[in-house]
Amino acid sequence: MSDNTAGSLRIGEVQSSYMAQARRRRLYSGIMLAIFVLLMVAGFQTAEDRNGGSFLGGIDNVFDYPAEVIAEAASKASELPGHLVHFFPALIETINIAAVSTLIGALGAILLSLLATRGMARYPRLIGVFRRVLDIMRAVPEIVIALVLIFILGGGPVPAMIAIAFHTVGALGKLFSEVNENADLKPLDGLASVGANWSQRMILGVVPQVAPNWLSYALLRFEINIRASAILGFVGAGGLGHELKVSIQWGQGKYDEAAAMFILLFLTIVFFDQLSSYARDKLVHGSNAGSH
């Protein structure tokens, strides 16, 4: 009887402790939500005060520009196919920038990720250094790097390619490093026992295990880099973004060209999104199926 009583007391203590923790959690969540709302309201009010016009008062005008673009494009619908053909080379340049940047960035990410992964690093004491390098490369936005390079090298696709590749190394290096940590280290020990050097251990022992996931992340990054290369065109990095900037700055009379470029960019992103999604699914699930 005493055991049952003691057990009931322990259960009651656990329940009361759990309820107390739940109440504290709700209290802390409520406080954080209140702080978040206050910060949002204060930030919005500051932006409203510093803005040239009223934000709320200008909401009605948000769709004015898209309406003008659509109206002009509709009135010149017969010219749309010609614009699509005319701006297609600029689209190819944008895709090329993204492809080369992704390739260079992925190669750099593979090297740095291996150097930054415990159990695989060539220089274990420098793992923290290589991880901070990846953090820095990932933290600097592409547009900042591109603006600096355009000032140094001039406009064109090269600054955009370097800027996107630099950021890609940091972004993919982080993802690749996480993939590497899940790899089995037993093949590395076996290769080391027969005298394989570090490069041979990585190529023969690690790459076959992680390559499908590496390729999956690289394809995902390629989609992102297509968008990034188009955006960098607005700051003088060439490609479709530059042509789109010119049409937008020209204003009425060129909105049909802007609409054609929007359509090209949209169709391209959808196409590569579907293609890379299919390829990633085959790489990851196909690899898992093969391993079983």
Image (cartoon, rainbow, N blue to C red):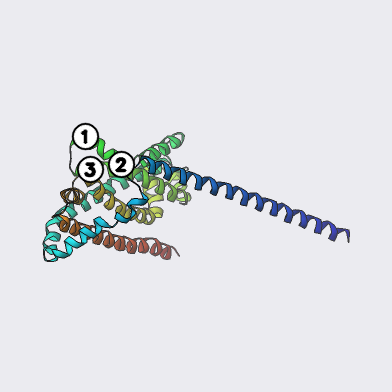
- Residue 159 falls in which quadrant of the image? top left
Q: In terms of sequence position, does the residue under pointer 2 or pointer 3 come before the other?
A: 2
- Residue 44 falls in which quadrant of the image? top left
Looking at the picture, which amino acid does disc 1 mark? Phe
Percent x, y of residue 248: 19, 51
> Which of the pair 145/194 is nearer the observer?
145
Q: In terms of sequence position, does the residue under pointer 2 or pointer 1 come before the other?
A: 1
Whether residue 272 is visible:
yes
Percent x, y of residue 262: 22, 57
Percent x, y of residue 256: 16, 59
> Position of 262 compared to 281: left or right?
left
> Position of 68 compared to 199: left or right?
left
Question: Disc 2 versus disc 1: distance between alpha carbons?
Answer: 17 Å
* SS state under label 3: helix
Name the mark nearer the viewer: 2 or 3. 3
Q: Residue at x 22, y 43 (%)?
A: 235
Name the mark nearer the viewer: 2 or 1. 1
* SS state under label 2: helix
Looking at the picture, which amino acid does disc 3 mark? Val
> Mark 2 sits on what residue?
166
Whether residue 264 is visible:
no
Mark number, residue 151: 1
Mark number, residue 235: 3
